[in-house]
Structure formats: C-alpha cells, structure tokens
Image: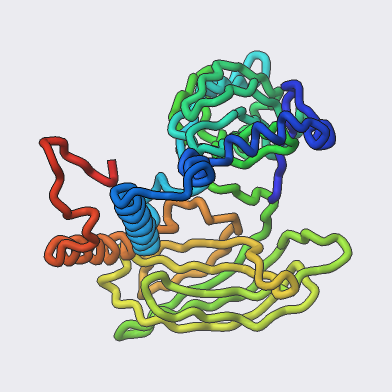
Amino acid sequence: MGNRASEPAVGQRSPDDDAKSPELIEGMARVMTTAKERRTANRNVYTREEQEEEEEEYSYTESAVILTQLFKKMDPAVMKSIGDVMGELKVSIKYKSDQSLLLVKVVGARDLSPKDLRGKAANAFVQVDLVPDPAGTGAKHTNVVRKSLNPTFNEIFAFPVEAGRLPETKLRLTVWNHDSLGGGDFMGERIVELRDLEPNQVLTNWYPLQEETDLSISGTLEISMAYKLPQLLCVTVHRASGLVCWDGSKLPHPFVRVMVPGISMVEQTDVKRGTLDPEWEQTYEFPVPQEEFDYRYVVLNVCDKSRDGVSMGEAHIDLCNFDPEEGYTGSFPLADMRNSDRVRTKWAQRALLQEFKEAMYAHSAYQFPKFLFHKHKGHKKWNEFT
C-alpha cells in the first residue's frame, strides 16, 4: 500500500524553485482569494439585501452538506459520486499470443474528481503496471491531460507476459493528478484480473475507479461451519498460514474478527504472538435463520495486534450454498476486500433501501430541510441531486 506515482517527464519544477518565485506565490494567493473576500476587503459595508442574500446562501450550503452527509452515512452507494475517488476509466486490453505481449490501450476517463483550487478540473495521467511483474518492465505512464475531468489519452503500452503467467497476473491502472509542486495526488485505481483474457481477444470496458487495493496481502485461512437447530450458525476458526509480514524485523501478532453482517455480534479470537502461521481452534455461534441464508455471508478478518489491528486480509463466505446438515470445512485465500462488490450485502441493500424510503417520506411530510421544498419563482425546475 502507499504506492506513490512515478511522475512522467512534464517539465516539473522543484518546490525550491517555486519558493523563490514571488510571482507564483502572489498568483496562487490571488486564486485562493474569492470574489466575495475581495469585495469584503474593499468595502466592509453591506446593503441589507446583500446581507440577507449571503445569510440565505450560507444556510443553503450548510443544509446541503448536512443532508449529503446524512445520505452517505445511511448508504454510501446513494451518493457514490461524492468523495475523493470518483469517475471511470476506459481501457482496451489484448493479449498477442504469438509475441507473448499484453497490449493495454488507455483510451480516456470521465467524471473524475476535481483537484484544482477551484474544484473544477484536474491534471490527470494514468499509471499502468502489472502485479506481479515477472519481466521487471516497471510502471508506464500516459501524458498529462491538463484542466479536464474527462481526459482523452489514446496511448498504448506493451508488457511481455508468458501465457502461463496470465492467470496469476493483475493489471493495475492508477489515475493520478499531476502536482506541479512535486508528487502526485491519488484519484482512483482499478485492478483488472487477466485470468479470463482469451488470446488475441480485444476486451474494452469502462472501469469504475476504486480506493487503493493492497495487493501485498497473502495467506489462507482454514475454517469450518456447522448448524444447530433452531437457528445457530457455528463458525470454527482453525488456523492461518503464509500471512504477510510487512516488517522484516518483527513478526505480526495475528487474531481474527468474525462477524455476519446484519447481526449485531462481532467475535474475536485470541491473539497469537510473533507468527505467520497461527492456530486458534475457537468456535463462535451466530443466530442465523435458515431462510436468511440467501443473503447472509460470514466475514473473517485477520488483523495484526502489533499494528493497532490493521487488516492482514479478509475472507467472505456466502451462505447461499451452505448445507446445514453436512456443514463445511475448507481454506480460503485472504485478500484486501475493501473494494469487493460484496461489501454491501443483500441484507444491507434491503434494510437501507427501506430506511431511505422512510426518510424521504418524512422529509416530504414535514417539508424539511426548507431549501428542498421552498417555492421557486418562474417555471424553472431545480433538483439538488442532478
């Protein structure tokens, strides 16, 4: 994690050069000063109309922020476009089997998160690399497209990869904002699995950008599940093996958090100190009726006590195919599941959708907040969420 962009050659200036430029500093200060602040500096006397207009604008902005945060807390997917990571990346992929080459064409991006001082544009470029990288090709970069949230790149990159290595290879596409002061601002990432890529087939998709994924996570977790009538799901955590060690001089102190999303119970195993292959043999019971198996799953999160409980990898186990009479025993690979499609459960979708509907009915009945329901002049229709 913490992968930083290797900047393309775009005529960067060092921070020291910028610090020596009074014109640049003055220009930045001018941009950061809003028109309203300049007006206030020049004239401290407001008319009554101007003061009422400013108070109304502040009240509206404050209400909009509160409502947005409320919806995000209820269901992050409702306000998916809000936040640091947003937008999509269009990419074409082809594997030329006769040359053992993976060709990646970065076509463009759309609806990226603004990164400039005014919050209206970005200087985006895309970093492309393979994980793992058996040929040691390294990361490649597109050119920077300045002042655009919908940049077009149309650049092709080639990576030598043997056909037998494709199933274990991942294509990592990272969008960065070029910062003239040095370094890059992370704008989003997408991991593309290559295991299903057919030779000489062109695969073109718009990929929604996601938060950064930790591809250094490794290891497996062995568990078993049984069922006790009338409605107890028994999960036994046996052992883990091959866990990742981020600090070569210090072994982790692993433990496992066990939960079933939608059930207000979080269990935790004992902490095993200084090992990459811990054993627990501990069992936990969760009240799960059989009729809920279709939309329930078990989350097992291996954490490191020595690093304040940071995750060392997760396994998500669906219950839709679980046979309560036979039970189950098996091993599951650990991975960074933060960007998994299953982070939002079917149960959560149902519960949050109902809660969202009830909240909307309440807002409508009480016509609150006022900025959504006050009368508008003229015939223009306005919608805050468009």
Q: Residue at point 34% right, 55% down?
A: 55
Count of numbered circles in the view? 0
Nearer to us in this view, 36 or 255 = 36
Image coordinates of residue 353 in percent, x first then y, are 25, 60
Who is closer to the viewer here, 57 or 162?
57
In percent of the image, x 65 and y 83: which residue is there? Answer: 270
Q: Where residue 292 appears, x then y in whole percent?
A: 29, 70
Q: Quadrant of residue 76?
A: bottom left
Residue 330, x across and y down, in percent: 54, 65
Which image quadrant: the C terminus? top left
- In the rendered image, the vertical position of residue 245 relative to residue 288, given as above or below: above
Residue 287 visible in image: yes
Left or right of residue 217, residue 338 in this image: left
Asked which quadrant contains residue 264, the reply is bottom left
Farthest residue to the top: give it.
98
Give the side of residue 6 with respect to residue 193, left or right: right
Q: Residue 67, image x and y in percent?
A: 33, 59
Is residue 240 shown above or below 370? below
257 and 142: which one is in front? 142
Residue 113 seen from this side: no
Q: How is the image coloured?
A: rainbow
**Is 51 left or right of 333, judged from the image as shown?**
left
Query: At 46% across and 37% down in the image, what residue appears?
Result: 87
Which one is nearer the viewer's eye here, 367 or 308? 367
Residue 79 as seen in the image, left or right of residue 168 = left
Q: Residue at x 70, y 49 (%)?
A: 2
